[in-house]
Amino acid sequence: MIARRRNDDIRKLIDHIQATLVELFDQMRELRRLLDMPMREETAVPESSSPAEEPPSAPLFSGVEAKGLRTESVGADSDRSASEPSSHGAGESSPRPVEASAPLASADETPPSSRVDAASIRATISRVLDPFAHEVASGDTPAAVLAEHLEEAKNYLITPDRPNERVARDMDIVLRFLRARGERGIRPEERDNILKRIERWKAHLAVSAVPSG
């Protein structure tokens, strides 16, 4: 029993670390985009490791888990990096001492409005999802009520004007699970799984909602 409990604790710690790494990678990618720094192909590797997070939740959401986040690829990220301008200063023919700092100046001048938009978007996402996360963390709210609140949050954050199939599909997985639980509460391991997913939703929604300039 002690060894099994220790293994469960280690597995939860690994899940938490992996979820944190995914969020950090998304934030780093957003910062690179705001600073107009091209994404290198190898930076997409941490995202592809996200399927390692999924096995602990397989018993929780049964067979539908296979249709969760792990089916997603990083193609959108590589497409974004491919569409970013890769060169500056192709026009000037006569060399000048200040030309070396021109890319830095342009990178500093353009992002302020984008930073404001990104901050506003993150604030909106947190305002909608944080109360739901608090309800999940408390463990006092019946699963059916949690399902209602999650559906409201989904309808507010994901619309035809602001689509996000990746997050919507994962939210649907959690919704089906909560509805199946009905008036019962959720167990600690289920609660931790959902909280981890909420953090991932916030990161993906923030990245996808920032307008690309």
Image (cartoon, helix red, strand yellow):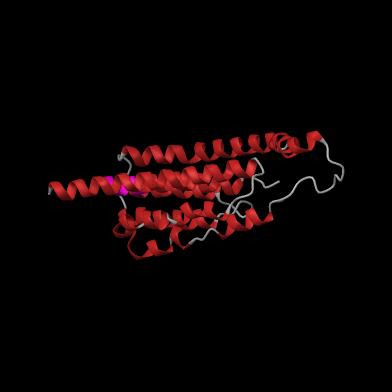
Foreground pick, 108 / 53: 108
Would you say the magenta stretch is mainly helix, strand or loop? helix
Residue found at x 46% / y 52%: 46
**Where's residue 185, x and y in %?**
28, 46
Give the quarter of the image for residue 96: top right
Foreground pick, 115 / 44: 44
Q: Which residues are magenta?
A: 186-193
In the image: residue 101, left or right of residue 53: right
Q: Is residue 28 above or below residue 81?
A: above
Q: Is residue 36 above or below residue 80?
A: above
In the image: residue 84, left or right of residue 140: right
In the image: residue 6, left or right of residue 85: left
Work out whether residue 143 can be spotted: yes
Q: How many marks?
A: 0
Q: Residue furthest right?
A: 94
Asked if residue 187 is among those painted magenta in the image, a careful observer would answer: yes
Q: Is residue 205 above or below residue 122?
A: below
In the image: residue 31, left or right of residue 19: right
Asked if residue 145 is among those painted magenta in the image, a careful observer would answer: no
**Where's residue 141, x and y in %?**
33, 42
Residue found at x 80% / y 34%: 97
Foreground pick, 26 / 121: 26
**Where's residue 153, x and y in %?**
49, 46
Residue found at x 44% / y 37%: 131
Work out whether residue 184 can be spotted: no
Q: Residue furthest left?
A: 1
Residue found at x 41% / y 46%: 19
Q: Is residue 180 above or below residue 20?
A: below
